[in-house]
Amino acid sequence: IAAPSKPSAAALAGLRFVARAEKADWKALPIPGAYLKLLSLEKARGYAVVLGKLDPGVRYPAHVNAGPEDLFILTGDLVVGGRKLVAGDFHHADGGSQHAENYSVEGCTLIAVLTTDDPLVAFAMA
């Protein structure tokens, strides 16, 4: 199999890539062992895509969702509302809904789609 050729600048216009090795883009949250990485921000459309990461045993405090929140678990586990989510599981929360304390037993990585007024998005942009 031939190696892929390098695309022209015109072919890459409007495209953005984030390599998994770019560890410098992770921001530590004020909760020890919790991290966030902004992948995409669509201000005009009102949403952002972020990666979240919790170390084993980390507990994320109870909160009210500023807007709708969609989570997809990539690795590990996350307990939300007393239900254990694992890799491949999806969770949606409506804006204004409440989450009790969420936690991860073995640690997790997740992708989240959040509204731009979510405090996590503001933190990721700061």
Image (cartoon, grey):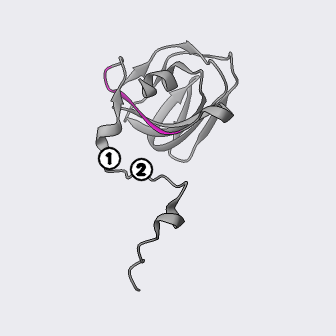
Q: Quadrant of residue 57?
A: top left
Judge left or right: residue 41 versus residue 54.
Answer: right
Residue 104 visible, this orientation: yes
Q: Position of residue 89 (x, y in %)?
A: 58, 43
Q: Which residue is drawn at the image coordinates 52% and 65% (left, top)?
A: 10
Amino acid, disc 2: Val
Q: Which mark is residue 48?
A: none
Q: Which mark is residue 22?
A: 1
Q: Which residue is drawn at the image coordinates 35% and 29% (left, top)?
A: 27
Tag 1 secondary structure? loop
Q: Nearer the viewer, residue 82 or 43?
A: 43
Q: Are marks 1 and 2 in contact (CB under 8 Å)?
A: yes
What secondary structure prevails in the magenta region? Answer: strand
Amino acid, disc 1: Glu
Q: Position of residue 111 (x, y in %)?
A: 51, 40
Q: Residues within 10 Å of mark 2 (few under 14, many from 20)?
A: few
Q: Which residue is drawn at the image coordinates 68% and 35% (left, top)?
A: 45
Q: Is residue 22 above or below residue 101?
A: below
Q: Residues within 10 Å of mark 1 (few under 14, many from 20)?
A: few
Q: Position of residue 88 (x, y in %)?
A: 55, 47
Point out the stretch of residues depicted in magenta.
Answer: 32-40
Give me the C-alpha separation between circle 1 and circle 2.
7 Å
According to the image, label 2 marks what residue? Answer: 18
Q: Is residue 56 magenta?
A: no
Q: Nearer the viewer, residue 64 or 104?
A: 64
